[in-house]
Image (spheres, rainbow, N blue to C red):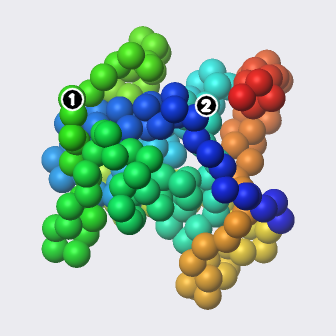
C-alpha cells in the first residue's frame, strides 16, 4: 500500500482548481461538493487519457465515494482555506453547495484546457452525483483496479471502511500507449 503524506499544492494548482470549480458552478445549477470533487477527478482522468498530461496533477485516494483528492476534499468540507479566493461553501438541505466568489479567470488555461472543461460540462454536467460515482467506480477504472489490487474493494462496497491512504496510479490509464506513458512520467518527474 502506498502512503501519502500531506502534499502542498502549488499556487498554479490552486488557481487552476479554483477557477475550474468556478467554471463548473457558473454552468451547473446547484453544484454540490461531491459533484465538484467528481468533476475535478474526471478532468484529470480525461486529460491523461487524451494527452498523457494531467489537468491538475492532484493525488487521488481510494475512498468509498472516491477517487478523492484529500486536500481539495478537506478544503470543501470545512473552512475553505486553499480555495478561499475562489469559492464559498453553503448548505442546502444538508448538502454542501459550492458558489463562486469571483468570475472565471482563464489565465491558467490553454485552449485545449477550455475544450476539455467544455467537454466535461457537456458529458457530465447534467449527471447526478450518484451517476458520477458510478462512472468513477466502473469496472477497470483506476479506482476500481486500485481498490481490487489492494484488497479493499469489497470492504469499501460493504461500507466496512470509508477511506484508505491508497493512492490511485493514474498512469494505468495509459499503460497501453508508450508515448503517452513517457509524456506522463516525464511530467510527473518534472513537477
Q: How many marks?
A: 2
Q: Which residue appears at 79% of the width and 35% of the height?
A: 175
Looking at marks 2 and 1 on the same chain, the residue that comes earlier in the sequence is marked by: 2
Residue 86 relative to residue 138: left or right: left
- Residue 125 is drawn in which quadrant? top left
Q: Secondary structure at mark 2?
A: loop
Q: Which residue appears at 75% of the width and 42% of the height?
A: 172
Q: Which mark is residue 103?
A: 1
* Residue 47 coordinates in the image, percent (x, y): 56, 29
Q: Is residue 100 shown above or below 190?
A: below
Location of mark 2 (residue): 54
Location of the N terminus (image quadrant):
bottom right
Q: Nearer the viewer, mark 2 or mark 1?
A: 1
Q: Secondary structure at mark 1?
A: loop
Q: Which residue appears at 62% of the width and 45% of the height?
A: 8
- Residue 156 is drawn in which quadrant? bottom right
Viewer-proximal residue, 3 or 44? 3
* Residue 39 coordinates in the image, percent (x, y): 41, 45
Amino acid at each position: 500500500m502506498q502512503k501519502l503524506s500531506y502534499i502542498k499544492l502549488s499556487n498554479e494548482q490552486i488557481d487552476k482548481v479554483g477557477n475550474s470549480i468556478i467554471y463548473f458552478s457558473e454552468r451547473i445549477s446547484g453544484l454540490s461538493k461531491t459533484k465538484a470533487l467528481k468533476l475535478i477527478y474526471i478532468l484529470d482522468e480525461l486529460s491523461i487519457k487524451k494527452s498523457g498530461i494531467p489537468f491538475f496533477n492532484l493525488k487521488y485516494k481510494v475512498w468509498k465515494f472516491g477517487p478523492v483528492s484529500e486536500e481539495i476534499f478537506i478544503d470543501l468540507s470545512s473552512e475553505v482555506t486553499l480555495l478561499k479566493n475562489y469559492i464559498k461553501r453553503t448548505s442546502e438541505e444538508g448538502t454542501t453547495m459550492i458558489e463562486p466568489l469571483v468570475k472565471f479567470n482563464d489565465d491558467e488555461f490553454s485552449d485545449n484546457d477550455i475544450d476539455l472543461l467544455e467537454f466535461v460540462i457537456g458529458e457530465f454536467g447534467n449527471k447526478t452525483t450518484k451517476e458520477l460515482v458510478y462512472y468513477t467506480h466502473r469496472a477497470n477504472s483506476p479506482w476500481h483496479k486500485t481498490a481490487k489490487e489492494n484488497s479493499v474493494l469489497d470492504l469499501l462496497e460493504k461500507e466496512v471502511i470509508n477511506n484508505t491512504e491508497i493512492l490511485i496510479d493514474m498512469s494505468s490509464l495509459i499503460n497501453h500507449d508508450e508515448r503517452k506513458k513517457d509524456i506522463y512520467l516525464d511530467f510527473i518527474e518534472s513537477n
